[in-house]
Image (cartoon, rainbow, N blue to C red):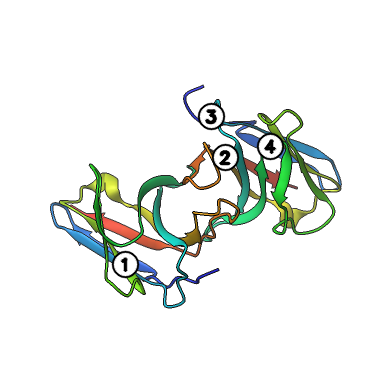
Amino acid sequence: LAKTTQPISMDSYEGQEVNITCSHNNIATNDYITWYQQFPSQGPRFIIQGYKTKVTNEVASLFIPADRKSSTLSLPRVSLSDTAVYYCLVGDQLSGNTPLVFGKGTRLSVIA
Amino acid sequence: GAGVSQTPSNKVTEKGKYVELRCDPISGHTALYWYRQSLGQGPEFLIYFQGTGAADDSGLPNDRFFAVRPEGSVSTLKIQRTERGDSAMYLCASSLTGDRPPFFGQGTRLTVV
């Protein structure tokens, strides 16, 4: 399974755009990149998933360069309620036989 | 139900006792996952069901841990002879099929005293 590396923590002010970059140098051809958000004492919540280039939904954007060795989660205009841990995961979603493996995530603190 | 439901939300048990944790997945979801999360750590994979069968149980830490999903819906995680080190948040997740990102429940916080 491809291992991911992401910053342990980040701080941001309200209203700013936050970009969290994840490295996954050993990503395999069938691997997708998935991001989850987790608040204290709650289960992780799916944010976005992508394979290449750019994916956007109502919550975030995911940028994936051509070599796919990294990805960047972009949160536009964060608010205090975006304070959470964000996990980057890489796994073979095509086969459907490989469960997602979580790392330690990035703890984002949004400051007023 | 609308989401993945886990019961109980909290469980306190004495060392050496047996516990069962229940997971009700989203209706129609064939894939079901159990994870365990300790404070300050990311969720740790335990076991993955596709339908009634365990497709991957490589994350179960030892033979005190066992999980079943007899009818392909509700799943029960069973822990025998609990130890203080088993204290953690136990998370269940389900997805429509194994190739979709799973949705997580709120977890069961297990405390072994």
Q: Which residue carries the number 2 mark?
A: B107
Mark 4 vs mark 3: in front: 3
According to the image, label 3 marks what residue?
B26
Residue A107 in sight here:
yes
Marks 4 and 3, how far apart in space?
23 Å
- Chain of the residue that carries numbered disc 2 in the rendered image: B
Which badge, 4 or 2, is on the more N-terminal residue? 4
Label 2 neighbour load within 10 Å: few <14, some 14-19, many 20+: many
Q: Which label is found at residue B11?
A: 4
Can marks 1 and 4 be said to lie on one chain?
no
Q: Amino acid at mark 3?
A: Ile
Question: What distance separates the C-alpha of mark 4 from that of mark 2?
Answer: 11 Å
Is A2 rendered above or below residue B37? Answer: below
Amino acid type indicated by mark 4? Lys
Q: Which amino acid type is shown beneath numbered disc 2?
A: Gly
- Report helix, strand or loop for mark 4: strand
Closer to the camera: disc 1 or disc 4? 1
Q: In the image, is B90 to the left or to the right of B69?
A: left
The crowd level at tag 3 (other Cα within 10 Å; few <14, some 14-19, many 20+) is many
Can residue A88 be seen from the camera position used here? no
Describe the element under mark 3 as helix, strand or loop.
Answer: loop
Q: Is residue A23 left or right of residue B95?
A: left
Same subunit under labels 4 and 2? Answer: yes
> What residue does disc 1 label?
A71
Quarter of the view holding residue A73: bottom left
> Which of B22/A14 is in front?
B22
- Provide the chain ID for the residue under circle 4: B
User: Would residue B86 be found to the left or right of residue B33 on screen?
Assistant: right
Which one is earlier in the sequence, the residue at label 4 or at label 3?
4
Question: Measured from the top left, where is residue A85 in percent x and y?
Answer: 39, 56
